[in-house]
């Protein structure tokens, strides 16, 4: 019945779960100015009946399945309204095409969004004729060739997204010359060389800047110093060499997301980053040395893995910290008792370091301090109420020496536990399955554990990777191995919604691609060290070899 209301000027049907095809009757709405059906499940091309829709200003077709060519879409936008069209949104709409030349006829466009389609060809120089453009998103296509410098004439532009294409060549000051209103810039994941004079003062003050995989180096770009409003900065894998300049931390003290990973940055980090506002701080795979800094209280995700940091583990004072990847450094000392207060921590990876001694034993006092608001509770006073929420705890290849850590009694949500290659001794406690009922991975390989394998271990119903090899366990292998249910079923019967030990802490964090979840996962199977990157969820393995079992 919509289509009879021919007086309609604005039709907003965003996210209405519409499916099927566009009806020809749409063309009856000749007064329509705005047509927005983004985020439905409409299949097929817009109808050829729109000829008389001469007032169309805004066409929103994003997140549908148009399944056709871009030129066909443009051809069906009525001739009479092309000149006046201000907004064209075709994001993730399954559109193909080898040219963006059509822009020459859409001279009034403010917003052009064709992100996430299969558009190839180059960015036309004529893009410079769209003088009103404020938002241009050509990201996530397969555009190639160079970026025309004409883009630098679009003085109204606030958002420019060219990331994830196959663009190449040079980006210079010219490309930015007139972009004094630019707030958001994405050039990442192309093959672009950004080469500007070292004294260049950018005309803009970016809030978000994505440069990952552009060539910015080897020198740390000096012009970044003038970007004092930046909240999001990605300069991962940009060929940067040398020290992080001293102004970096103050210039970006208000940023929430900083990614300087995968470069050749060296030198010590500042001792104190408490003045920052960063939520996600990624610095992995550099050549950084020195101590792990005192973190800002806002930090939720920290990745400093694969550097050369030495000195002690930080006295974790970041109450919001959810995931910390500190693996493959040279960190010494032991895990401080402050970990007992870290109620938000999910993932802690300290593998491949020089940590020693024992883990703290969190008593009720320490745990309470991490959860002061639950002080008054009359109902739950048990330890469990105050327990930690760690799901992945990875300590392999250190020098921890003690009995099986009592710390683990306070980690009832543990899913991945890796104590491989340390100097742990003594017997496995009977409480192992009661304290950590959800364990999917239990790796105690290459330690000095001894005694019998406790029969309680059969209570680990979700365990899929059980590696007790290379210890000094003795006695009989417990009889009822078939009770390890997850190992006897072929399908994934548990409800684990994540795939590897690194992933969990990253879910529900800012929806940015995470580097941690990309990390490989090493598993020893039949004496071979195998590397897995995905689908570790389906991996099953039991290894009791190299003990004194009968
Ligand atoms: C204290 O306990 C009462 C009753 O259980 C509850 O209503 C209240 O929200 C609690 N206060 C705090 C700060 O947890
Ligand atoms: C509405 O559109 C349909 C299909 O394009 C057409 O057959 C019909 O005559 C139109 N109705 C009016 C009132 O214009
Ligand atoms: C995209 O459109 C083509 C052509 O209509 C179709 O064959 C293909 O299945 C569509 N792709 C998706 C992911 O729907
Ligand atoms: C524009 O309209 C004219 C007249 O209606 C028509 O001849 C021409 O083919 C149209 N152009 C396009 C590109 O549709
Ligand atoms: C621009 O429009 C004219 C006439 O409507 C048409 O002939 C021409 O092919 C269009 N140019 C592009 C690049 O689509
Ligand atoms: C990317 O562009 C280069 C030339 O710059 C070309 O050789 C290559 O085939 C393109 N790759 C894709 C996937 O389009
Ligand atoms: C153990 O960690 C050290 C760094 O502390 C590293 O050099 C070594 O390669 C690691 N060994 C294994 C087997 O990963
Ligand atoms: C919690 O209880 C302790 C003593 O048990 C007390 O010192 C502290 O002030 C209490 N905190 C809150 C927030 O009530
Ligand atoms: C292994 O355990 C046995 C007792 O079961 C003990 O006698 C022996 O010393 C242990 N070996 C090592 C290397 O710890
Ligand atoms: C798994 O999920 C199902 C339904 O979503 C639920 O009934 C069941 O209790 C869950 N099992 C576990 C072990 O959480
Ligand atoms: C993710 O892993 C793939 C496969 O090894 C690798 O090519 C890629 O560089 C990795 N990406 C990052 C950001 O580490």
Image: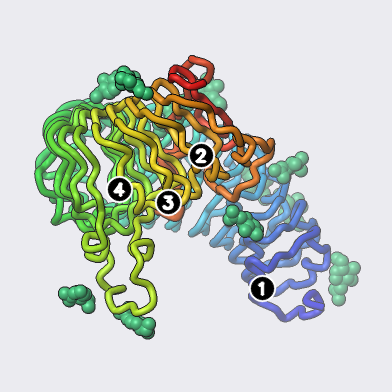
Residue 324 picture location, percent across and down? 30, 44
Which residue is the site of mark 4?
Answer: 407
Which residue shows up at 14% across the image and 54% down it?
274
Residue 536 picture location, percent across and down? 54, 33
* Mark 1 or mark 3, earlier in chain: 1
Residues at circles 1 and 4 in contact by the CB criterion of under 8 Å: no
462 or 37: which is nearer to us?
Answer: 462
Image check: 142 left or right of 210? right
User: Separation of disc 3 and disc 2 at Cα?
Assistant: 15 Å
Q: Residues within 10 Å of mark 4 (few under 14, many from 20)?
A: some
User: Separation of disc 1 and disc 3 at Cα?
Assistant: 57 Å
250 or 534: which is nearer to us?
Answer: 534
Residues at circles 3 and 4 in contact by the CB criterion of under 8 Å: no
**Which label lies toward us, 3 or 2?**
2
Please tell me whether mark 4 sits on a helix, a strand or a loop.
helix
**Residue 123 visible somewhere in the drawing:** yes
User: Separation of disc 2 and disc 1 at Cα?
Assistant: 66 Å
**Which label lies toward us, 1 or 3?**
3
Residue 11: numbered disc: 1
Which residue is the site of mark 3?
Answer: 435
Residue 455: numbered disc: 2
358 or 30: which is nearer to us?
Answer: 358
Residues at circles 1 and 3 in contact by the CB criterion of under 8 Å: no
Quarter holding residue 171: top left
Please tell me whether mark 2 sits on a helix, a strand or a loop.
helix
Residue 358 picture location, percent across and down? 22, 39
**Which label lies toward us, 1 or 4?**
4
Is 333 situated above or below 366? Answer: above
């Amino acid at each position: 019945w919509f289509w009879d209301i021919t007086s309609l000027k604005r039709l907003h049907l965003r996210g209405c779960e519409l499916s099927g095809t566009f009806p020809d009757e749409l063309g009856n709405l000749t007064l329509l100015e705005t047509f927005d059906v983004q985020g439905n499940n409409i299949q097929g091309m817009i109808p050829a009946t729109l000829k008389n829709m001469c007032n169309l200003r805004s066409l929103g077709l994003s997140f549908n399945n148009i399944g056709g060519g871009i030129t066909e879409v443009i051809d069906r936008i009525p001739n009479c309204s092309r000149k006046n069209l201000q907004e064209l949104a075709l994001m993730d709409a399954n559109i193909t095409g080898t040219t963006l030349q059509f822009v020459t006829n859409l001279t009034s466009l403010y917003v052009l969004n064709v992100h996430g389609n299969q558009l190839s060809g180059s960015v036309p120089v004529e893009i410079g004729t769209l003088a009103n453009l404020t938002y241009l998103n050509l990201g996530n296509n397969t555009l190639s060739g160079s970026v025309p410098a004409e883009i630098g004439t679009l003085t109204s532009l606030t958002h420019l997204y060219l990331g994830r294409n196959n663009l190449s060549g040079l980006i210079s000051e010219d490309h930015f010359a007139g972009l004094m209103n630019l707030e958001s810039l994405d050039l990442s994941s192309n093959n672009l060389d950004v080469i500007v004079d070292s004294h260049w003062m950018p005309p803009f003050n970016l809030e978000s800047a994505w440069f990952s995989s552009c060539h910015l180096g080897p020198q740390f770009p000096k012009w970044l110093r003038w970007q004092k409003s930046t909240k999001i900065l990605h300069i991962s894998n940009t060929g940067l060499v040398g020290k992080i300049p001293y102004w970096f931390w103050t210039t970006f003290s208000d940023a929430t997301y900083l990614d300087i990973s995968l470069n050749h940055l060296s030198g010590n980090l500042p001792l104190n980053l408490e003045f920052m506002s960063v939520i996600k701080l990624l610095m992995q795979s550099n050549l950084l040395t020195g101590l792990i800094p005192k973190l800002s209280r806002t930090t939720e995700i920290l990745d400093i893995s694969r550097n050369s940091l030495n000195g002690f583990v930080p006295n974790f004072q970041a109450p919001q910290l959810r995931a910390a990847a500190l693996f493959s450094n040279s960190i010494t000392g032991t895990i401080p008792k402050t970990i007992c207060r870290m109620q938000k921590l999910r993932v802690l990876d300290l593998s491949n370091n020089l940590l020693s001694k024992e883990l703290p034993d969190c008593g009720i006092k320490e745990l309470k301090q991490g959860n002061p608001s639950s002080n008054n509770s009359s109902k739950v006073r048990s330890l469990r109420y105050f327990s930690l929420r760690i799901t992945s705890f990875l300590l392999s290849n250190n020098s921890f020496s003690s009995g099986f850590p009592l710390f683990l009694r306070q980690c009832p949500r543990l899913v991945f536990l890796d104590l491989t290659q340390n100097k742990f001794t003594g017997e496995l406690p009977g409480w192992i399955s009661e304290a950590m009922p959800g364990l999917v991975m239990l790796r105690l390989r290459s330690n000095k554990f001894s005694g019998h394998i406790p029969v309680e271990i059969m209570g680990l119903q979700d365990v899929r990777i059980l590696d007790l090899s290379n210890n000094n366990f003795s006695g009989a292998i417990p009889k009822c191995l078939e009770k390890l249910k997850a190992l006897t079923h072929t399908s994934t019967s548990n409800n684990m919604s994540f795939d590897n030990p690194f992933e969990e802490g990253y879910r529900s964090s800012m929806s940015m691609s995470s580097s941690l979840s990309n990390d490989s996962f090493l598993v020893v199977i039949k004496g071979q060290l195998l590397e897995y990157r995905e689908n570790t969820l389906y991996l099953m393995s039991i290894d009791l070899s190299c003990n004194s079992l009968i």
